[in-house]
Amino acid sequence: MGGTGHTRFGRLREGLVELLAAASREALGDGRRGVDALFLGTQGVPGCVNAGAKLADALGIEPVPAFRVETASSSGAAALHAAWCGVASGRYGRVLVAAGERMSGLDTPHATALLADVLHPYEVRAGATMPALAALAVREYMARYGLSREALSAVAVKNHANGVLNPLAHFQKSVTAEEVAAARPVATPLTLLDCAPLSDGACAAVLDGGAGDIVVAGIGAGTDALALHEREDPTTMGATRAAARAAYEMAHLTRKEVDVAEVHDAFTILEIIATEDVGLFGPGDGGRAVERGITAPGGALPVNPSGGLKARGHPVGASGLAQVVELARQLRGEAGKRQIDGASVGLAQSTGGFGSCNLVTLLRRAG
Amino acid sequence: MGGTGHTRFGRLREGLVELLAAASREALGDGRRGVDALFLGTQGVPGCVNAGAKLADALGIEPVPAFRVETASSSGAAALHAAWCGVASGRYGRVLVAAGERMSGLDTPHATALLADVLHPYEVRAGATMPALAALAVREYMARYGLSREALSAVAVKNHANGVLNPLAHFQKSVTAEEVAAARPVATPLTLLDCAPLSDGACAAVLDGGAGDIVVAGIGAGTDALALHEREDPTTMGATRAAARAAYEMAHLTRKEVDVAEVHDAFTILEIIATEDVGLFGPGDGGRAVERGITAPGGALPVNPSGGLKARGHPVGASGLAQVVELARQLRGEAGKRQIDGASVGLAQSTGGFGSCNLVTLLRRAG
C-alpha cells in the first residue's frame, strides 16, 4: 500500500467531488501521473451517478479508467476490495482508491429515508429505519446476554475519548456515560449518543501491487438475508462472519494475531456485535470487553482508536475506507496522539445496509 | 465464459431485482450453488442502493459476496470488467455478473433529468440533456465530414431490421428512412427514431476462470473530460479510444480480426462515432459504411446484430452487458435468425454518460 489521504470529517463546505479530489491528492502526493485506474466508493446519499468519471475529471487524470463500487454503507471497503482484485489480476499496476459522502445538507427525516433505501422494501413499508433495527438487535442482545445500558454507553464514551485525539474527527469532544444514557431517545434503548452522526468527508489510498511497507493481507466480503426478521439471530451478522473467515484464510492469519481493529459502530451495539463476529471476543463477551477497558487505547486489543463512526463521523460511503486509512497510519506509526504502539496487524470491519453486505480487510506491516 | 441470461427488454411488469434474478437464474442454470461472488451493474434510474445484496437475497445465495459497480450507462460493461479482475486475481473462481435497469415507470421529463445527472453540473445548469449533447456532436460531425440525414437514418433502419429478428428486443418492428427523418424532433437534427427508448430489462453471464468455449480476451476502460465543451473534438470519444487500445493490447488482437461488433447507439450518431473510435472505420467513414451495408448482417462487418440500444432497447445499466451476452451467443451459434455465421472474435463498446466513462470488451472463441 502506498500513500493515504483523509479530509476532516464533519459538516463541511465542499461538495462530494471536491472532497474526494482533496483526499486523492493527499494520497497521491507527487505521484499523480502514475495512476492506472481509479476505484471509487460512495453510497450516494443523495444519489451521485458517474462519480468515478467526475473524480477522474476533477483530478485531471482522464483517460484513466474509473469505476464506482457501491455496497451501501460499506462502499469504501468494497472499492478497496475491487481495487485489490484489479491489481492482483495484473490488469492494473498502481490504483487509486477513494471513498466519500456528502450528507450534511439533508434534513434528518430525508436522510433517514434515504439511508433506509438499503433495507428490504417490506421492512421499509412497515416503518423500519436503521436505528429501529439496531434497537431490535440491542433488545434481543440485552435479553440474551445481560448486556447493560452502562456497557453500551462505554462504547460511546471510549470512542468519543478517542475522537478527542483525532484532529480529523467530526466530534473532538468527550462524553460521559451519564450523558449517553440521558441523551434524547432515538429508538429505545438507543439514544442520540449511541448513534453515529451524518457527516461529510472523504479518504483515499493508493495500492501499488504489493510494494510498500503495508500489505493488504486479506480481503473478505459476505452477504446476508436482507430483512432482519428473516435471519436466525439478530445478535450476530452472518455477513461479517463470512467476510472475516475469507479474510483470515487469505491472509494466513488468525484472530489472535490482530493488534488493533476498526469496526462499524454506526450504533454502539454494532461495535460489540462486530468484535464478536470477527472472532475477537466470544458471543456475549463484547460488551464486557469494553467495560473492562480491553478495547481502550491502552487495553490488550484497542478497537476504533480513530474514534470510530461514532466520533470520527460517518460519511457513509467513506467509512469503510477511512478504517483502512486509520489502520495504515497506525501500523506506520503516523497516528499522532492516538498511536497504538507496536501494532503490526490491523483488522477493519465494515457493515453495508443493516448487515446485508459486509467486508473485512486485514493489513499487516511488511517484512 | 459460462452461461448467459437475458430477459425480454421493453416495458415490463417486474421490478429491477426480479428482472436481475430472472436473468441470473437463466445464466446459472443448474449451477446456482457454485457461485463465489456476484458483480452487479446498474446505473440506478431511479436510485437503487445496495442492489448487490438485494440480488444475492433474491437468489438465496447469501453469504456470497456481492458488489454493485456503476459507471452510468456503461455499468453493465463495468461490472463485467470488475468481475474479470475478481477471477483473474485468484480471489474468486466462478463469478456471476448481472446488469439491469427499470425505467418505464418514469415520465419522460423526470427520466431525462435523472439521466442528465451523469453530466457536468455546468452543462446541466445550462440546460444540457443527453439528446442535446448528441445533437451538438452530430451537427459538428455533419459539417466536418458531410454526413447526410440519410446516413443517420440508415443506422436506425438497420438496427430496427435487426430487432425484428431478436425475440428479446424492445422493438420488433422495422422502420423506413423516411419514417426516421419525419419522426417527432427531439434535438434537431435528431428525431425520436434516432434515440434509444427507455426500457426495462436485465441480463447476466457467468465467468469461470477461463473455462468454457468463449474467452474474455480483452477488457479496456477509459474516461474523458466530463463536459463536452472541454474536449478538443466532439466527433470522437477519447474514452472509447483509450478503452479500445487497452482491450486490443490485452487480447493481442487488432481491429482487423473483429468479426462482429455491438456498440452503444443510444443515438444513431453514436454508433457511427463508436465504430470509428474502436478503429473499425476511419474518421468520417462510419456513416458511409452504414449506407453501403458494410455493417448490415450480410455485410463485411456486422454491427449491432441484436438491434442495438436503438431496437433491443436501453435499460441503461443493462446495455453494456447485453452487448457481451449477444456476442457470446453469436460466437456460440445460438443467435437464431440473426446469426452471423463463422464469427470468432466479437467487440463490445459501451458508453457511460456522454462519453466520460466508456468500456470495450473483446470476446473470442476458444481453441
Image (spheres, coloured by chain):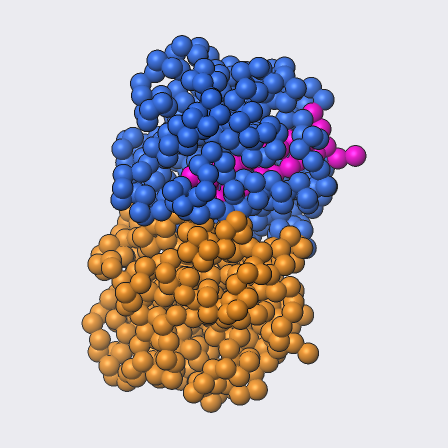
Chain colours: A orange, B blue
Task: Report the span colored magenta.
Answer: B343-367
Which one is nearer the viewer's eye here, A148 or A183? A183
Q: Residue at x 62, y 72 (%)?
A: A212
Residue B74 rendering spot, x and y as whole percentages: 49, 40
Q: Residue at x 37, y 63 (%)?
A: A19
Residue A113 magenta-highlighted: no
Quadrant into which the C terminus of chain B falls: top right
Residue A123 rendering spot, x and y as whole percentages: 33, 50
Which one is nearer the viewer's eye here, B99 or A4? A4
Taking B174 as reference, is B330 above or below it?
A: below
Q: Residue at x 40, y 45 (%)?
A: B230
Residue B347 rendering spot, x and y as whole percentages: 62, 33
Q: Is residue A56 in view from this perspective?
A: yes
Quadrant into which the N terminus of chain B falls: top right
Magenta stretch: dominant SS?
Answer: strand
Which one is nearer the viewer's eye here, B100 or A148? B100
Residue B5 rendering spot, x and y as whole percentages: 56, 32
Q: Residue at x 47, y 75 (%)?
A: A326
Taking B119 as reference, is B166 above or below it?
A: above
Which residue ends up furthest to the front in the rendered image? B144
Which residue ends up furthest to the bottom in the rendered image? A298
Residue B349 magenta-highlighted: yes
Q: Is residue A124 left or right of residue B330?
A: left
Q: Is residue A132 left or right of residue B43?
A: left
Q: Is residue B25 in view from this perspective?
A: no
- Which quadrant of the view contains residue B268? top left
Q: Is residue A285 left or right of residue A93?
A: left
